[in-house]
Image: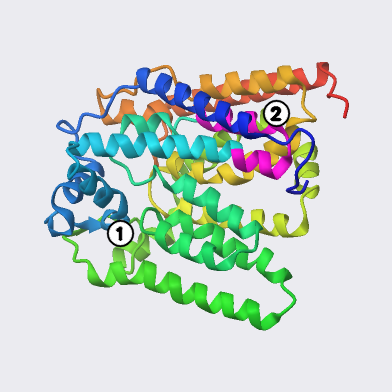
Amino acid sequence: MTAKTEKNFPRRNDHLLAGILSIILISLLDLLTNHVDVTRFQWDFRYYIAMAQDGLNTPLLASPFVYRYATPLLVRMLTGLGLSIEGGFTVIAYLGAFLQLTGIFAFTGWMTGSRKAAWIAMLVTGFSLFHVKFLLFDVFRPDHLAYAFILLATWLAAQRRFTPLLIVTLIASQFREFTIVPLIAYLFSFARTESARHKLYAQVGLSILGLVLALGLPRLILPIEADFQFISLTPDGILRGVLAPFIITRDINFVYTLLSYLMPLWIAASIPQIQSAYRALSLEWRHFLTVYTGLVLLLSFFGGTDFPRFTTFLFIPQIILLGGLAEKTHGLVLAFMLAATAFFNLVWLPIPMDSMEAYRDFYGGYNGQVTIVTFWRILEMLVFVLFGWILRKRLPAPQP
């Protein structure tokens, strides 16, 4: 599978329709979604709201939230136009969701030359809880624009456009740390195919320098009043990192969130078919996806406690592999996959605010919280995958 223009490559009207549909989908999800009670709970949002209100002069500067200052400061700029703090965050939430969904449509269409693949990739991402619905529930998050930045960076990497890729990455890293992954994956994949070795060394050196400045300077300059990082250079932070792999409940949740996020793949295709779609990619793309996936898994496991939010950054390998499988998969299988994704992610239900346990059980996979709900969700996922397997066995694959 290569990025090239084919007969059924999405045209301008397709992109316009995708934009309209994404607005309808975002609006529908918003209607079905309640909003976090910022007066009852004291979560991450209090730090982002404080920065939006008072900038970097707020006394509520805590790591790692302060290092994702770009979104709150954008909101602070929007308040100068007359918007409230919540209104500013909501505008960015809608913009981020729109750019994410339409970007996935455009990227998958460019990657595969298939309208079908582009629609499937966009919808399966839109039906995933933490890509859109959760960010409409808690708009006070820094993640909204991160997905669009990652899409743009991945496209620039495939185009071997190092300078704009580096610039985009340095800007995006002020929104969310996961946005550095495409640049690093590029250095291990597309950059290695350059004929001049000195050019590769120069790109590696500039990347290291840029990332050290972009990630290091805020951590040196910005004062913090509290540290909530899961792993840090403190004795407690180092100990948490060492012990994390040995906490069984945490391991269960990590594996569960990984498998459940990729459930659309398990429904749409068998393991050999997924492997075949992977092998159909160019060598550079295979290297890129391998490094990209490995880094996301590493950052997800050691990055904190909200595994379901972190695993969403696996959307790049998921949409690429689904894109490669879409034309070879029966329409009913794909329809069931979309329905199962929406159902499993409970997109029509309000997110519980009764208690922290009910809230975390709603999506599951939080840190070390394993309850009976966790096992019911695992069983539900297995039933969906099994039914997908039965459908694939009974329905013929489309003819090329």
Q: Amino acid at mark 2?
A: Lys
Residue lying farthest to the bottom in this orientation: 198
In the rendered view, would you say 311 is above or below 203?
A: above
Task: Please give the residue where the numbered disc 2 appears in the rendered image.
Answer: 116
The quarter of the picture where residue 89 lies is top left
Q: Residue at x 75, y 76 (%)?
A: 195
Mark found first going from the N terminus, 2 or 1: 1
Q: Residues within 10 Å of mark 2 (few under 14, many from 20)?
A: some
Q: Residues within 10 Å of mark 1 (few under 14, many from 20)?
A: many
Q: Is residue 256 visible?
A: no
* Label 2 vs label 1, nearer the camera: 2
- Residue in front for this viewpoint, 48 or 4: 4
- Indicate the position of residue 137 as horizontal and vertical percent values: 32, 29
Quick check: 262 left or right of 8? Answer: left
Q: Residue at x 69, y 18 (%)?
A: 387
**Highlighted magenta segment, given as a residue range:** 106-127
Residue lying farthest to the front in this orientation: 12
- Residue in front for this viewpoint, 247 or 395: 395
- Dominant SS of magenta comes to helix
Quick check: 146 left or right of 202? Answer: left
Task: Please give the residue where the numbered disc 1 appears in the rendered image.
Answer: 67
Q: Residue at x 35, y 22 (%)?
A: 33
- Indicate the position of residue 342 as horizontal and vertical percent values: 52, 22
